[in-house]
Image (cartoon, rainbow, N blue to C red):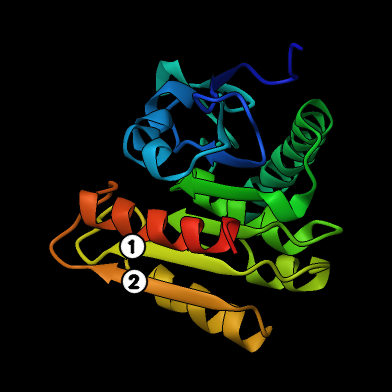
Amino acid sequence: MKFSLDTKIIKPENSNIKNAVILLHGYGGDGNDISAVTLNWKRFLPETIFICPDGIEKCPINPNGFQWFDLDKDDPVYILEESIKAEKKLNFFINEIKSEYNLNNSKICISGFSQGCMMSVNLGLTSEEKFNCIVGFSGKIIDKENISKRIKSKTKMLLIHGDQDDVVPPNRLLEAKDFLMRHKVNVKTKMIKNCGHHIPIEASSIALNYIKKNLYI
């Protein structure tokens, strides 16, 4: 099947698919970039398919990459509107995945980096049914006031951030944790020491253990 978003897919070796991890790349990246984390994860997550879509539109600062929403305007209202458009397209895409591989939300983890993390958090709060879990790296909550009015489900989350991040400041992790706890979302967080805006081995390993624990309950 051809999906609505161009997608890199890594299937389990035995072709017996029981779970899915959907990986959402950061601003200017693509599905191939974010798929790098699966090199280590797939050995420990048998019967899991990894789905790595490209963003919904080309990124103006990197014509070879993609974005989930436009950042050209420094306007919170515009950014929110664009992110909600992306959310709708991702929901359509996720429904395609569920249909193609006969999976329900309880068998799906959504993970993302930076802009992809922001989208993952929104999806975990606004879906009609909880996902298995959300794992976010180096992100934030796009608009706390808006999302607080749209919460339909409270998917458990792990959020990881570098304490030296100069793209998305590390205090965004603390803000997200406070917001999620106040809305009674089961959230775990980890601040990685001496880490900038990327996914180091330590963060990847912590995420893997969390996903494994939740997908294989």
The residue drawn where x is 23% and y is 49% is 200
Residue 87 in percent (x, y) is at 73, 43
Question: In the rendering, which numbered label is found on residue 189?
Answer: none
Residue 17 in percent (x, y) is at 65, 33
The residue drawn where x is 59% and y is 48% is 110
Residue 214 quadrant: bottom right
Residue 180 quadrant: bottom right
The amino acid on which the numbered mark 1 sits, given as a three-letter code, is His
Depth check: give the residue in front, 77 or 215. Answer: 215
The residue drawn where x is 46% and y is 75% is 188
Depth check: give the residue in front, 22 or 145. Answer: 22
Q: What residue is shown with label 2?
A: 190
Give the class, few, some or many, for how many residues have Cα within 10 Å of label 1's Cα (few <14, many ≥20).
Answer: many
Depth check: give the residue in front, 159 or 15. Answer: 15
Residue 38 in percent (x, y) is at 40, 35
- Is label 1 in a helix, a strand or a loop? strand
Q: Would you say 79 lies left or right of 211 here?
A: right
Distance in Å between CA atoms under marks 1 and 2: 7 Å
The quadrant in which the N terminus is found is top right
The amino acid on which the numbered mark 2 sits, given as a three-letter code, is Lys
Q: What residue is shown with label 1?
A: 161
CB-based contact (under 8 Å), mark 1 and mark 2: yes
Q: Would you say 75 lies left or right of 45 here?
A: right
The quadrant in which the C terminus is found is bottom right
Q: Would you say 214 lies left or right of 169 here?
A: right
**Does residue 106 appear in this view?**
yes
Q: Which sits earlier in the primary sequence, circle 1 or circle 2?
A: 1
**Does residue 138 appear in this view?**
no
Residue 25 in percent (x, y) is at 47, 36
